[in-house]
Image: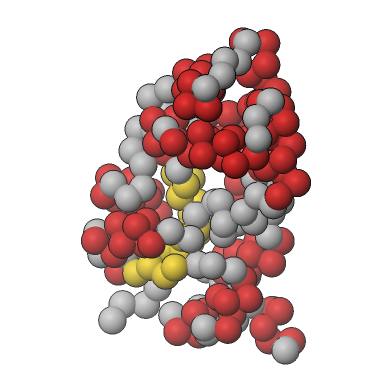
Amino acid sequence: MEQVRAVIFDFGGVLCFHPDEPRWRRAAEAAGLPVETFIEAFWANRIEYDAGRWTPQQYWQSVARIAGTHFEESRIPELIRREIELWNHYDERVFAWINQLRAAGYRTAILSNLPQPLGIELRNTPGFLEHFDYVAFSYELGFVKPQAEIYLETIGGLGVEPAQGLFLDDRVDNVEGACAVGLRAELYSSWEDFLARGLPERYALPAPAEARRQ
């Protein structure tokens, strides 16, 4: 079996934590909706938005229709800001490990389904993308996980063979999509679980400094 030469990270649920209840509540309040109604409408047509086929205005009016309401155009910038704030709680432990990987000569990438406003925010966040040798954002590529094309684009951008890449994602269908193109892939639920399962050691990757201290 080939040695892993690159590690590919999903964004939501891997590089950053899933939104907590206060974040969802603030976003729902900006929309004037109950939290459960907002979350259901938020996810209903997400693929079109993430694939770059819908503008933010189209997406948010779709959210409004599903929720049985209407958003004035003047409200959409605040909705976009609240959406970005859902995903800005980064897991610094993961980023510390990425620094270790790169120092040891491994290549790294971020591969994420996300819409244009969030992608622009990440590109404008000082130092964020410096952790990665390649960046694959769905809205820029026109493909979304688990479509094969987005994985192949990332593998090509990293300059490795599929079997030399390890992909970490919090969704089963995205992990299965990665495996279908020959990547090695693991379902990621939390940093604690990642260490408890011994995944760095399983793939002969550098042990996170945190794990070495334990």
Residue 75 at what x, y percent from top left?
67, 16
Viewer-nearest residue: 211 or 64: 64
Above or below residue 106? Residue 197 is: below
Image quarter (top left, top right, bottom left or bottom right) of the N terminus = bottom left
Identify the residue at image location x=74%, y=87%: 213
Residue 3 at what x, y percent from top left?
37, 77
Residue 40 in view, yes or no: yes
Identify the residue at image location x=53%, y=27%: 67
Using residue 58 as the reference point, say whether residue 194 is left or right of it: right
- In terms of image quadrants, where is residue 6? bottom left
- In terms of image quadrants, where is residue 85? top right
Residue 31 at what x, y percent from top left?
66, 26
Identify the residue at image location x=56%, y=19%: 69
By what rule are the colours in the image chosen? Answer: secondary structure
Residue 162 in view, yes or no: no
Above or below residue 1? Residue 141 is: above
Image quarter (top left, top right, bottom left or bottom right) of the C terminus = bottom right
Above or below residue 183? Residue 25 is: above
Identify the residue at image location x=40%, y=73%: 4
Using residue 47 as the reference point, say whether residue 26 is left or right of it: right
Above or below residue 73? Residue 28 is: below
- In terms of image quadrants, where is residue 120? top right
Viewer-nearest residue: 122 or 2: 122
